[in-house]
Amino acid sequence: MAKQSSVTSISIGVGLATGVYGISFGALSVAAGLDIWQTQVLSLLMFSGGSQFAFVGVLAAGAVGGVGVGAAVVSAWLLGIRNGFYAVRMAPILNRVGLGKLIPALLTIDESTAVATSQSDSKDQVKGFWLTGTAVFVFWNLMTLFGAVLGDALGDPRAWGLDAAAAAAFLGLLWPRLVERQALAVGAAALLIATITTPVLPAGVPVLLAGVAAVVVGAFNWLAPKAVKN
């Protein structure tokens, strides 16, 4: 019983802690030009914090039209790729088939995967996944709505510095990941490309071009750690 309670308390605690960040996303999304309902639909359907911040970050940078939306989608997709790897890890644990995979796919995020895989018992793994995923989904969407309403009530985002906050939040998400040579190389190359092209290309295009850096570095695998020979 104590063990089950522990999984429950961890899941609810993670859900609450993560949900608080939804306030920031809601306010930043409205500042980027989305209305309250567009912001809420984004949280309900995309439901991936890093990808959502990336999406509104591009919009906040002034990207408009088809190119701007395309750049925002690609940025969000690049950050969301990791969820596919989580799904591979969680598939044998959840043992779902067919349409039964749809809801677990939505809830397969950093937090639900982390809590599930940290459990030693298979039942606790399943319980940790569902409880954490559900808790984060509920609290994240509630706080998104609160943040969007709050951001809308603040009025002009420039008066509060919110027009630059989305980009700052995006950088905050990326910074802890820059711990390996490949990640640093991608970041440096993307920064150089974006800096050079931003003054001369429409908003959104520099983001797409900067993404090429990740493709090139990953394809050639130049800076990957070398295998140690026995």
Image (tube, rainbow, N blue to C red):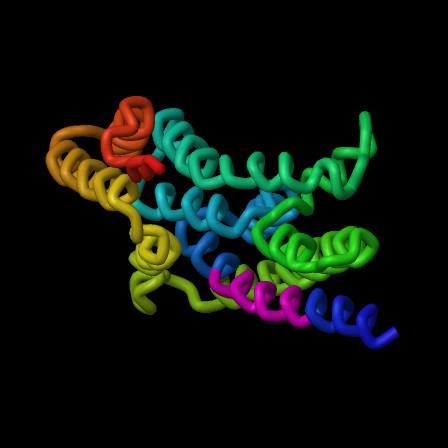
Above/below status of 32 relative to 3 = above
Within the image, what quadrant is residue 217 found in? top left
Q: Indicate the position of residue 177 as horizontal and vertical percent values.
A: 36, 52
Magenta span has 18? Answer: yes
Q: Nearer the viewer, residue 52 or 8?
A: 8
Q: Nearer the viewer, residue 7 or 140?
A: 7
Q: Indicate the position of residue 184 as horizontal and vertical percent values.
A: 24, 45
Q: Can residue 192 be seen in the rendering of this structure?
A: yes
Within the image, what quadrant is residue 10 found in? bottom right
Magenta span has 145? Answer: no
Q: Which residues are magenta?
A: 13-24
Residue at left 88%, top 73%?
Answer: 1
From this viewpoint, which residue is outermost toward the right?
1
- Looking at the rendered image, the quarter that the C terminus falls into is top left
Above/below status of 148 relative to 195 = below
How many numbered dots are placed on residues in this image?
0
Residue at left 43%, top 35%?
Answer: 78
Side (left or right) of 167 relative to 110:
left
Q: Nearer the viewer, residue 126 or 224?
A: 224
Residue at left 49%, top 47%?
Answer: 52
Q: Can residue 37 be seen in the rendering of this structure?
A: no
Q: Nearer the viewer, residue 99 or 91?
A: 91
